[in-house]
């Protein structure tokens, strides 16, 4: 953590004395003032932060960025269509316990069993929220990624855990309820794959929409922190302009995001590196001319175009 960290823990909440072992490494990220304010409001009000925005706008990376900046543990939960709210707390290995009971009853196998079948808690596997609730020294950052992949009951089921008193029980064990000493910082992403989320859930969230950068300077700042120097500054400028022009097309079904731009510059650099070094200048001038003309074929379209309809419009001319 540094004094320049833009994120603020709640008054009276102590941060870790040193970086938590589960804290992620710093990630390159540029957060707008509006996004920083949304994060700090969510922390201050003990509310989940719900993020929306197109793919590639940096929704998922924000949670890791917050955890790294504050030195807090980071626990991601990638939601699937079969996910249940219970999965974020814990899963119970009943079959493993039965297996251990059987193994312990066999001659000379006691040493192989490292768990005690008489202790049900030995068979609990903590999920992202379960790990966060068990943090004793500081809050944890939990990413619930793509919440709308799950069924319609999933968001509301989360409320029973994320609302006060923020506790849950391990039903399979005679164990005291596990209560969060430090409310976790919960960041949730949504792509609206199944429409709007339930109103009771939305009412309890802080909301922010991450807009994709719309000008050359913003994108160049992102490229700079990612150290994406695969091609010259002149070629980068022209490529970014062509990239933004492509994104502005009304007939483009899947707009490329930041990760595609980074990969595209790497692909352009690879194209320039082919052949002998003496012809590199010629290839660079040719590529600059191709990128500068909107009607010219898009170089390395495989990196930017991910749907057949887009490929047929802007892919290679056959």
Image: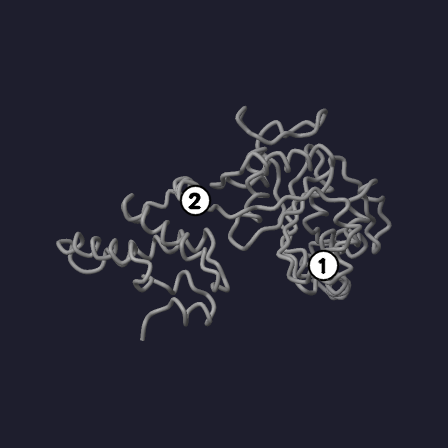
Question: Residue 98, image x and y in percent?
Answer: 77, 64
Q: In the image, is residue 185 above or below residue 113?
A: above
Question: Residue 314, image x and y in percent?
Answer: 38, 66
The residue pinned by badge 2 equals 215
Disc nearer the start of the sequence (2/1): 1
Q: Nearer the viewer, residue 55 or 315?
A: 315
Q: Nearer the viewer, residue 127 or 92?
A: 127
Residue located 45% across and 53% down the image = 259
Q: Quadrant of residue 18?
A: top right
Residue 91 placement, left or right of 226:
right
The residue pinned by badge 1 equals 110
Q: Quadrant of residue 118?
A: bottom right
Question: Residue 299, image x and y in percent?
Answer: 32, 61
Q: Quadrant of residue 221?
A: top left
Q: Is residue 193 visible?
A: yes
Q: Classify the position of the C terminus by image quarter.
A: bottom left
Outermost residue toward the left in this view: 278
Q: In the image, is residue 122 above or below residue 307?
A: above
Q: Nearer the viewer, residue 14 or 53?
A: 53
Q: Residues within 10 Å of mark 2 (few under 14, many from 20)?
A: few
What is the CA distance from the residue labelled 2 to the residue labelled 1? 66 Å
Q: Secondary structure at mark 2?
A: loop
Q: Secondary structure at mark 1?
A: helix
Q: Residues within 10 Å of mark 1 (few under 14, many from 20)?
A: few
Question: Residue 59, image x and y in percent?
Answer: 57, 48
Residue located 69% across and 45% down the image = 131
Q: Nearer the viewer, mark 2 or mark 1?
A: 2
Q: Nearer the viewer, residue 278 or 200?
A: 200
Asked if marks 2 and 1 touch (Cβ < 8 Å), the reply is no
């Amino acid at each position: 953590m540094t004094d320049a960290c833009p994120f603020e823990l709640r008054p009276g909440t102590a941060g870790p004395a040193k970086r938590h072992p589960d804290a992620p490494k710093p990630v390159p990220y540029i957060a707008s003032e509006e996004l920083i304010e949304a994060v700090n409001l969510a922390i201050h009000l003990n509310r989940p932060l719900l993020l929306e925005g197109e793919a590639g706008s940096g929704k998922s990376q924000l949670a890791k960025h917050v955890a790294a900046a504050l030195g807090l543990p980071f626990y991601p939960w990638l939601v699937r269509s079969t996910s249940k709210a219970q999965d974020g707390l814990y899963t119970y290995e009943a079959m493993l316990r039965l297996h251990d009971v059987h193994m312990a009853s066999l001659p000379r196998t006691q040493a192989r069993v490292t768990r005690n079948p008489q202790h049900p808690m030995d068979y609990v596997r903590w999920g992202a929220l379960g790990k966060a609730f068990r943090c004793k020294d500081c809050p944890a950052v939990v990413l619930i990624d793509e919440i709308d992949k799950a069924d319609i009951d999933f968001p509301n089921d989360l409320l029973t855990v994320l609302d006060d008193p923020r506790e849950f029980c391990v039903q399979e064990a005679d164990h005291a309820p596990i209560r969060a000493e430090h409310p976790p910082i919960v960041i949730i992403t949504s792509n609206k794959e199944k429409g709007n989320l339930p109103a009771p859930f939305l009412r309890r969230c802080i909301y922010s929409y991450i807009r994709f950068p719309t000008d050359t300077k913003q994108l160049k700042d992102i490229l700079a922190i990612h150290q994406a120097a695969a091609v010259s500054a002149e070629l980068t400028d022209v490529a970014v302009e062509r990239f933004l022009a492509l994104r502005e097309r009304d007939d483009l079904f899947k707009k490329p995001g930041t990760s595609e731009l980074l990969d595209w510059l790497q692909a352009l650099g690879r194209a320039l590196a082919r052949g002998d070094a003496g012809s590199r200048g010629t290839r660079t001038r040719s590529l600059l001319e191709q990128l500068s003309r909107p009607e010219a074929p898009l170089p390395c379209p495989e990196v930017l175009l991910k749907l057949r309809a887009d490929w047929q419009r802007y892919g290679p001319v056959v």
